Amino acid sequence: MESVLGDGAEAVVVARDGDAVKLRKEKRYRHPDIDVRLRSTRTRQEAGILEKLHRLGFPSPELRAMDDRAAEIRMELLCGEKVRDLLDGSCDWNPLAEQLGALVAQLHQNDIIHGDLTTSNMLLIGKRLHLIDFGLGYYSAKAEDKAVDLHLLRRALTSRHPALAEDFFGAAISAYRKARLEQSGPVLERLALVERRGRYQKGS
Ligand SMILES: Nc1ncnc2c1ncn2[C@@H]1O[C@H](COP(=O)(O)OP(=O)(O)O)[C@@H](O)[C@H]1O
Ligand SMILES: [Mg+2]
């Protein structure tokens, strides 16, 4: 028995035999050789990050198997509520924002960039927040890359949850700062720059 958990532009995720299986879709607009290479590279990259996160005890799905030629990852099936849906309803969001800030700090501490911090990629299981979808994840020690990760989180919040985006982001950033102490300084300075740049690009 299979049920579809998610079907987006890049991948389809199904529940299969108690696991979650993520299959990266073929992209017909790409040259077939390039497409195969890209999908297998991203599959390996995502699987590698999931393994690393498991070693760190980070709340993310445990990798079960990876087939880079088939562009398929089998991982632990997490049963939780999407933060996107929780924020659409009325919920006590402050603990979520605080946990999120601490989790992103832990990723950045380990030079892991999530790359797609939208509220669809956050699941609450019991009281514990989990992050999924490291499909755009990569390793970097650069403050710039960490700042962009945070900037994309802010943008995702503003577009999906405009009413509470600023307060939620502010609470997450406080927790991030607290968790990373002095290391957060250069990233948050960079964030201010990245956001100024974004405003100029929009022409306002
Ligand atoms: N390990 C998992 N356990 C439970 N649901 C998952 C898991 N991985 C993905 N999903 C579900 O599938 C959706 C799409 O998966 P995701 O990894 O975010 O791929 P995409 O790149 O298409 O966004 C997620 O939003 C989530 O609902
Ligand atoms: Mg996703």
Image: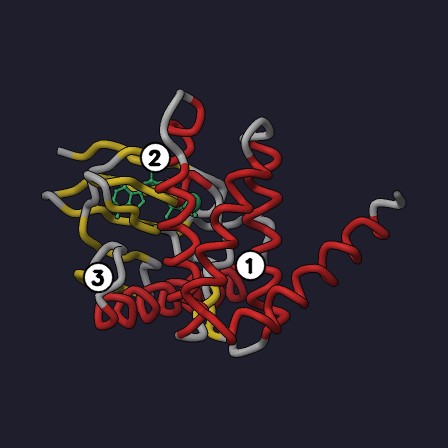
Disc 1: residue Cβ within 8 A of ligand 2's nearest atom: no
Q: Which mark is residue 63?
A: 3
- Direction from residue 99 to residue 157 in the image, left or right: right
Q: Secondary structure at mark 3?
A: strand
Q: Residue at x 28, y 40 (%)?
A: 124
Kind of residue sitting beneath label 3: Leu
The single residue placed furthest to the top in the displayed view is 89
Which of discs 3 and 1 lies nearer the camera? The answer is 1
Vertical arrangement, residue 11 with respect to residue 53, above or below: above
Q: Amino acid at mark 1?
A: Asp
Q: Residue placed at 42% from the left, 73% from the top?
A: 109
Circle 2: residue type:
Lys
Give me the disc on residue 149. Answer: 1
Indicate if the residue with disc 2 has its beta carbon within 8 Å of ligand 1. yes
Could you give the CA–CA distance between mark 2 and mark 3, rounded to whole angstroms?
Answer: 20 Å
Q: CA distance from mark 2 to mark 1?
A: 20 Å
Give the alpha-carbon distance from disc 3 to disc 1, as whole Å.
23 Å
Viewer-side residue, 183 vs 64 = 183
Q: Position of residue 50 (x, y in %)?
A: 29, 64
Which callout, 2 or 3, points at the residue further toward the start of the chain? Answer: 3
Q: Residue at x 56, y 56 (%)?
A: 150
- Mark 1 element type: helix
**x then y, percent, for residue 93:** 40, 34
The residue lying furthest to the bottom in this view is 141
Q: Which mark is residue 82?
A: 2
- Which of labels 2 and 3 is toward the front? 2
Ligand 1 location (quadrant): top left
Up the image or down, 100 lies above or below 68; here it is: above
From the viewer's perspective, tell me whether residue 21 is left or right of residue 114: left
Please tell me which residue is depicted at 55% across the width and 59% down the height of the picture.
149
